[in-house]
Structure formats: structure tokens, C-alpha cells
Amino acid sequence: MALDDAIIRRLIDDHGVDAFFTPAERAFIANPRPSDHERLQFGWRSEAARVLFWALGFIEALGLPLQQLTSDEIIEIVEEKRLAGMIADARPRSTSEVLDEADLIYRAHWAARDADLAGKSTAPLDHGVTMERHHALNWLIHYDGQDWDHVTTDT
């Protein structure tokens, strides 16, 4: 489910988070008519948000990458916690937990890519969910020193 532009703007303004967006994210948000491709690409970032919320302790477990998180679930976390609550309530995962998830998602991503290359189904893994989680986990572990807009998901 795509978020309405008015909802996005309200959330950004209500939470005072303009300064936290990357240049690519700012450009997307400022674009009054992004392409369908751009909307799809940025819509997938909900899965990266799931990983970041997990890393902060707001989600109990990630589980296998089988199904995309809905925008409603992200909004619920943001609205419930608000920025000050997120800062106060954050209970960051240990380095070993993050590295374990990074290893698991690397392996899941390789399995999905290998299946794609062989012309087979990636089921039950959702390839898009897997790739977005891989992106966020690579950023968390500082993979190759890449910033958020340029993180790669090598397998």
C-alpha cells in the first residue's frame, strides 16, 4: 500500500525529521510527480525500516523475509513512539545479533538470486523483502563503508 503524499508530509512535519533524510530521499519527497518506478523503489524502503526498528528493539523478531511489511505497520510504530519516544525507548540489539541477521539475510539473498538465475521460484522467500533487508543490514554493519543511498547488496 503506497502512502499518500499528504500523509508523508504530515508525518515529516509532525515529527520534525526533515534533517534526517538523505539527498536521494529529499529529492524523492520534493518531487510532486515521481515516476511509478521511483514510487516503487522508495516504497520498498518499508522493509529497510522494519530492520532499523528491529535493530532499535521496537520489533521483537524479523523472521524470514516472506512478506512485505505494510505502510500501516510503519506508521503505527512512528505514531506510537514519536521521535522523542524512539530515542528514549531504543534498546539497540547487540553487535552479534545484528551480525547474525546480516549473515542470515546474505544467505537468503543468495538463495533467492541463485533461484532467479536458474529460472526457479524464490518461494517462500520474497526477493524484494530480502534485498531491502540486506540493504539495511549492510548499512548497519558499515559494509564497505557505503552511505545509505549507495549501499550494495552483493552476494
Image (spheres, rainbow, N blue to C red):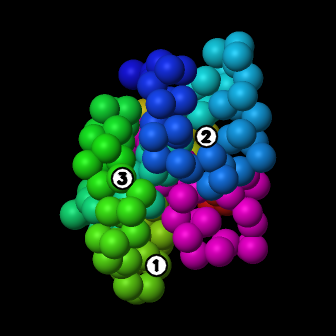
Left or right of residue 18, residue 81 in this image: left
Asked if the stretch drawn in magenta spans residue 127, the answer is yes
User: Residue at coordinates 72% horizontally, 28% vertically from top-left?
Assistant: 30
Residue under pointer 3: 82
Which amino acid type corresponds to the residue marked 3 in the rendered image?
A: Arg
Residues marked 3 and 1 touching at CB (< 8 Å): no
Residue under pointer 2: 117
Dot 1 lies on which element?
Answer: helix
User: Residue at coordinates 68% horizontally, 25% vertically from top-left?
Assistant: 38
User: Residue at coordinates 64% horizontally, 15% vertically from top-left?
Assistant: 36
In primary-sequence order, the first of circles 2 and 1 is 1
> Does residue 14 show up?
yes
SS assignment for the magenta stretch, majority = helix
Query: Nearer the observer, disc 3 or disc 2?
Result: 3
Q: 152 or 51: nearer the eye?
A: 51
User: Residue at coordinates 32% horizontally, 77% vertically from top-left?
Assistant: 91
Provide the residue span drawn in magenta. Answer: 124-152
Dot 2 lies on which element?
Answer: helix
Q: Dot 2: few (<14), some (14–19), or many (≥20) neighbours within 10 Å? A: few
Residue under pointer 1: 99
